[in-house]
Amino acid sequence: MASWTRMDPVDRRNLTITGRHRAVTGPHVTVEDDVLVIITQAYGPRGDNLVGISGVEFDGHPAVTLAIRALGRDGLVHLSPIHGDGRKTKPFDIPAGTRCELLCPVSGQPLDFVTEVGDGSDARYYAIYLTPQLSQGSMVMVSDLWGHYHSRIIDDFELISAWAARHP
């Protein structure tokens, strides 16, 4: 597991939001209609594929699948790969605000911790990597609190989710 300090993972002094979203898209992130960001590749902490392993789809796009542990139970959660889309399946009833342990459904390893969310909740971000290189520069940061719909996409060290929020 990577050992990152609990700090902002974005080098904000060197962050540039270019607006050239097609220039930073690759086979792992697709931009449709200039506003829809879709995760097409995702990897766990060991490099295992997380997209399309379940057969579950959202609007024709294969889900990103994670294993979770919460409330003494475990199961698979299938997340919409469309950034900002809160749809997901759940294996059992989970009340909002429940902390979940996030795991790779293939290896069973916990996802890598990235940072505290810093929005006043006690949520923490964990990494879903966008490339097999498992780089902090290309990842989706997902919250470990059920119902806490804050996630961030970083690609080529650009914070795409911030750009997308400013360009509706």
Image (tube, rainbow, N blue to C red):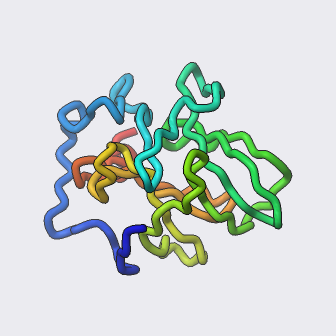
* Residue 115: percent from left, percent from top: 43, 72
Relative to 68, is 10 above or below?
A: below
> At 72% across and 61% down in the image, what residue appears?
69
> At 22% across and 68% down in the image, what residue appears?
11
Foreground pick, 138 / 20: 138
> At 43% across and 36% down in the image, what residue appears?
39
* Residue 70: percent from left, percent from top: 76, 63
Locate the C terminus and report the quarter of the image it occupies. top left
Which residue ends up furthest to the right in the rendered image?
93
Relative to 44, is 102 above or below?
A: below
> At 26% across and 34% down in the image, what residue appears?
25
Foreground pick, 69 / 155: 69
* Residue 110: percent from left, percent from top: 55, 62
Which residue ends up furthest to the front in the rendered image?
107
Relative to 50, is 115 above or below?
A: below
Which residue ends up furthest to the top in the rendered image?
60
* Residue 116: percent from left, percent from top: 48, 75
Locate the N terminus and report the quarter of the image it occupies. bottom left
Taking 34 as reference, is 52 left or right? right
